[in-house]
Image (cartoon, rainbow, N blue to C red):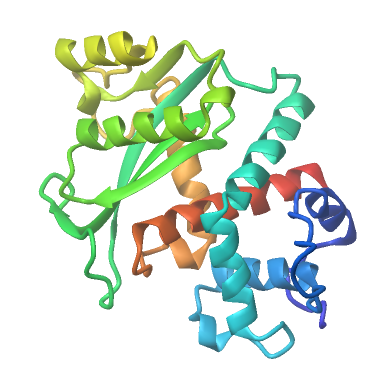
């Protein structure tokens, strides 16, 4: 395989990631594909924003690359990678492996012309497409992502986000106590519901009343920076995915690539 692409894994990065790859199934044929090349190809798709069929011939066949991308989405491998790398980054930054505080926010993104499932219109942002709901730690690393129609309100999306987080990563949230949110999540009823259901405290960070133009708000800037990181991935510039779950996976892959660069 050629190593001329900037998205290709380095030896150090592959050494970290390879231990998180699921082992071969003893009842199946031995693998005859280079998984390092497969992951590098997925990173290429993520950053270049091209279609699967336009994958350069230096990589394995696009059908093989897509097979592993989809397989690891369904069996949760991408989530495991994201979780383990996140713990390693947090320890490197002298933090506890699992966070006690987090931030929630959402971002509306336009959909590609070929996308029709779970598409709506965000009348507040005047965007037709989907909405990314993020739960991030205080370093901006994504704990959970849920993609919904842009028509969904912030609170409705947050309810789905919290439910998915509790079902899929509850072991990572044992120490979570406080979540910072913006004014879109305010309301005594919603805050009380979160407290009664999950035992988490929502703290609303409000924009100063008389402020004009851009204002750097405490805590909220962390999740905004996470959204900014996605701008380095052309596949995330719009929602080109037929399934919302595929877009969620690309967000996880983007974070995996970012954390590998920090660790190695």
Q: Is residue 145 above or below residue 25?
A: above
x, y (%) of residue 81?
Answer: 67, 46
x, y (%) of residue 92?
Answer: 78, 28
Q: Is residue 228 above or below residue 178?
A: below
Quarter of the image where one finds residue 22 = bottom right
- Which residue is situated farthest in the front direction here? 27
Quarter of the image where one finds residue 126 = bottom left
Quarter of the image where one finds residue 39 = bottom right
Position of 151 compared to 165: left or right?
left
Residue 183 visible in image: yes
At horizontal 17% and vertical 38% (from top left) the residue drawn is 153
Residue 7 visible in image: no
The residue nearer to you, when weighing 139 against 215, is 139
Q: Is residue 133 above or below residue 18?
A: above
At horizontal 71% and vertical 71% (from top left) the residue drawn is 38
Position of 125 compared to 40: left or right?
left
At horizontal 29% and vertical 25% (from top left) the residue drawn is 182
The residue nearer to you, when weighing 180 against 201, is 201
Number of numbered callouts drawn: 0
At horizontal 71% and vertical 40% (from top left) the residue drawn is 85
């Amino acid at each position: 395989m050629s190593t001329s692409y900037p998205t290709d894994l380095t030896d150090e990065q592959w050494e970290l990631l390879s231990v998180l790859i699921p082992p071969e199934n003893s009842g199946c044929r031995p693998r005859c594909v280079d998984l390092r090349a497969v992951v590098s190809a997925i990173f290429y798709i993520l950053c270049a924003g091209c279609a699967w069929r336009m994958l350069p011939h230096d990589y394995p066949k696009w059908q093989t690359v897509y097979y592993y991308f989809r397989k690891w989405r369904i069996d949760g491998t991408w989530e495991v990678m994201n979780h383990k790398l996140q713990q390693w980054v947090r320890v490197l930054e002298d933090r506890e492996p699992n966070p006690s505080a987090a931030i929630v926010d959402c971002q509306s993104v336009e959909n590609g012309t070929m996308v029709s499932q779970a598409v709506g219109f965000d009348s507040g942002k005047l965007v037709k497409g989907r909405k990314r709901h993020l739960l991030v730690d205080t370093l901006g690393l994504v704990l959970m992502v849920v993609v919904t129609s842009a028509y969904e309100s912030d609170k409705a999306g947050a309810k789905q986000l919290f439910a998915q987080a509790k079902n899929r990563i509850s072991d990572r949230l044992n120490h979570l106590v406080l979540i910072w949110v913006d004014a879109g999540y305010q309301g005594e009823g919603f805050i009380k519901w979160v407290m009664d259901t999950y035992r988490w405290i929502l703290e609303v960070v409000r924009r100063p009343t008389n402020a004009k133009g851009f204002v750097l708000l405490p805590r909220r800037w962390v999740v905004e920076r996470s959204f900014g990181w996605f701008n380095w991935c052309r596949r995330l510039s719009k929602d080109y995915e037929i399934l919302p779950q595929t877009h969620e996976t690309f967000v996880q892959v983007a974070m995996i690539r970012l954390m590998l660069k920090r660790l190695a």
